[in-house]
Amino acid sequence: VHDSMKRVLERRGEQWDGDMDWFNSDRALVDEMSLLSGFFTLLVGEFAPGDPAYRYWSNHFGWSPEEVYDNAYLVHFVAGWKPWRSGIREAKGNETEELRRVFRDWKALRDETGCTEPSHRRERREK
């Protein structure tokens, strides 16, 4: 799984319609995986107090939230938590350090790759 994610992420400049489309773009991964642990697609709610997923993996592994974040393969931004939508404002001020870190790291990666918005938003705007 790690090698497949690495291959996909190294193909800079490619655009996908949705945040899971990039994941499914590696045929070797898709053809061989029938079940993927939730830890590989860690939900942003892991770090958001009040979310049903809050500290799920921390409790499961007996790790601190920092250890969960440091060992996560990726973080899946669900629904309104998408950084290009309301993002961290969904926390309504109830933020943890790891939640702030997730969004800081996302913004840094966005700036590094030059991808300022999801391709489906850009395509709509260009029409």
Image (cartoon, grey):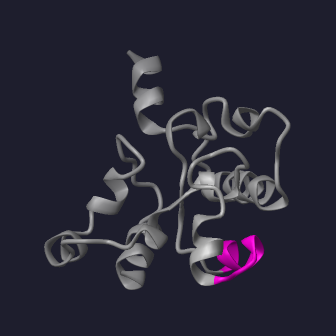
Residue 100 vs residue 60, the one in the foreground: 60
In this rendering, would 121 be left or right of 82? left
Residue farthest along the top direction in this orientation: 127
Q: Residue drawn 70% across and 33% down?
A: 90
x, y (%) of residue 25?
Answer: 27, 61
Residue 113 falls left or right of residue 4: right
- Chain part drawn in magenta: 62-70
Percent x, y of residue 100: 80, 53
Can you give x and y, in whole percent of width and height, for residue 11 in the image?
41, 66
Q: For this view, does 51 lie left or right of residue 25?
A: right
* Nearer to me, 60 or 9: 60
Residue drawn at x 35%, y 40% is 17
User: What's the residue at 27%, 60% (across, down)?
Assistant: 24
Residue at the location (60% across, 82% down)?
61
The x, y position of residue 95, in whole percent, is 82, 47
On-image quarter of the C terminus: top left
Q: Magenta segment, principal secondary structure?
A: helix
